[in-house]
Amino acid sequence: LADTVDGEMLRSRSKLKRGSHIEVLTGTVRQMSGPHPQRQSADEIEWWDWLALQQFNNMASARGGVLPQVWYTSTRQRPAGLVQRIVDAAPTSGIEVYQWCVFENVDGAIPLADGGCSPCAKAACLLWADCRECVCPPDQVEDGTCTHEGRAARARGHLMRMEVIDKIQLAAGDRETWVTQQLSGMPGKTGLLYEEFSDMNVTLDGDYTGNGLLYWCYDEGWSDPNVILMVEIQPNKDIHVFGEIYRTHEQPKDTIERAFAQGEQMKWPKPRRAYGDPSAILFAAALGDVGIPGEGPKIRDVLTGVKMMREVIKDVRGHRRLKIHPRCENLTFEMNNIRRKMLSDGSYSDEPDKDDPPQPDHGP
């Protein structure tokens, strides 16, 4: 692009000779709130904050006869992360999905002797098990009667075969990471804090019934969201989460007003009490101003809380006491993605990983 730039090419903004310009922004709600380009691209959206991505989606606008165009690029890293969320919604959202794997980025025309794929080495290549598309039995592969080549041999990308072999060797036996990051496979649930959580916990049965005790649960944030969850404890101790408010860069009193407005629209009564993070002092004070007593949780030990949460997600009898209504999309996303802390030996502790950006945990 150097020949198309008018003047110096800058990291944040470069003007092009045809009159347009390219601007690079960080993926935050604040940065996404001003510009309105005709065309925009978001990179590695798997690690974006969901609310920032929604703000990004509202940026593009048609100007000068150029229609708006939005595209995302990313590796799918989590079983229910942002990439999978967008892929699942594609049939109704109109988003076109294009998937490819590492073998499609290999230059298969490079000679085998030079680290390439021509001719295909078949079973003698460390990549053959994943690269092959045929179902020929091993004896045909070994005696040369199998005439099929791997996908990489037909590709005309930018990688050499030996680079891909380096990648699989560096994976050090972590098959799941290899399949997810290089083969565009579906990630597993290894390392998730709540592996027991599933679609069976997300149900229309989790709606407000009027038969139980109504509470709010809250957490305070700024760049991370303020969160209010509407919860009803049923007579049989089932927990229905039937409403949610997630708001960034907003004062607690404004988030509380939004929760009241939603409750009025849905005919939900005022909660009798609210429970939240004991450090959310401003939130508790704002709740008190509207007549809702706010207090910290009865259990403050993290590991004890995680254990109790797992038991309500699915107990030893297989009963799922936690029922989340499908309208609570943000909470469902967080439950599906909050991760455990990885230890130095590659195993996982039972504690949530506070350093995994962005760690979605304000709802849970």
Image (cartoon, rainbow, N blue to C red):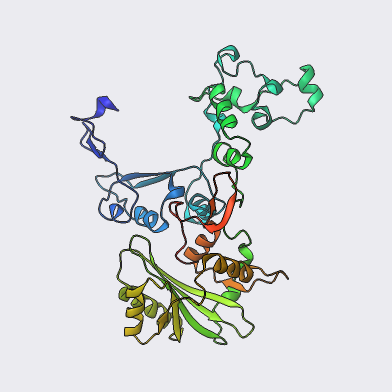
The outermost residue toward the right is 139
Q: Position of residue 129 (x, y in %)?
A: 69, 30
Q: Position of residue 157 (x, y in %)?
A: 50, 25
Q: Position of residue 206 (x, y in %)?
A: 57, 75
* Image: 37 above or below 212: above
Closest to the observer, 5 or 9: 9
Q: Residue 202: in sight, yes or no?
A: no
Q: Quadrant of the N terminus?
A: top left
Q: Residue 125: in sight, yes or no?
A: yes
Q: Identify the image quadrant of residue 55.
A: bottom left
Q: Identify the image quadrant of residue 24.
A: top left
- Indicate left or right for 249 with 267 as reference: left
Q: Residue at x 62, y 28 (%)?
A: 151
Q: Residue at x 71, y 69 (%)?
A: 316
Q: Position of residue 2 (x, y in %)?
A: 27, 26
- Exactly how many numbered labels are in the figure? 0
Closest to the observer, 268 or 191: 191
Q: Residue at x 47, y 67 (%)?
A: 363
The outermost residue toward the top is 113
